[in-house]
Amino acid sequence: VQLQACGGGLVQPGGSLRLSCAISERAFSGYTVAWFRQAPGEDQTFVAAVRFGDGNTFYGDSVEGRFTISRDKSKNTVYLQMNSLKPEDSASYHCAARPSNLNSGSTRYRRNYDYWGQGTQVTVSS
């Protein structure tokens, strides 16, 4: 399974970006797909996750209310819509997948994901 992330770029504070994560094979109902981010010198942190089957979503505390994760089953793609961006959102964003449903208590741990894509850089700056 390969994951291809794209959509990063430079945006001003308050702006928006949409990231995409394309999955190389059909993501069956049992998949959970997540976004993590890592800024230079910092640990990788959980951003958001979605379960492909039922569409349940989960968010990290720092992005809830500003970011929206969604999936398009027909395109085998997960999106991360990021609004009201702040300089502290600047990081390399990585998507990850696990071929099983994760519950809310498990989605935020990177050790629970089997497949990872390359990062896409998001820079929020004026």
Image (cartoon, grey):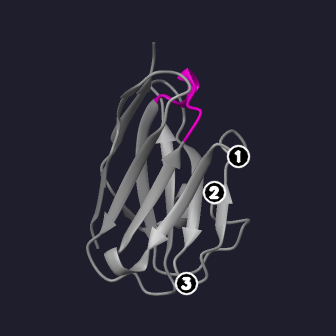
**Range of residues picked out in magenta:** 83-90
Residue indicated by mark 3: 53
Is 109 colored magenta in this rendering?
Answer: no
Label 1: how many residues lie within 10 Å, few (<14), some (14-19) or many (20+)?
Answer: few
Residue indicated by mark 2: 108
Above or below, 12 relative to 25? above
Residue occupying image coordinates x 52% and y 41%: 44
Label at residue 65: 1
Label 3: how many residues lie within 10 Å, few (<14), some (14-19) or many (20+)?
Answer: some
- Assign the N terminus to one quadrant of the image: bottom left
Residue 77: percent from left, percent from top: 37, 68
Mark 3 or mark 1: which comes first in sequence?
3
Residue occupying image coordinates x 48% and y 53%: 80
Residue occupying image coordinates x 36% and y 59%: 21
Q: Which residue is the extreme one toward the top? A: 126
The mark tally for this picture is 3
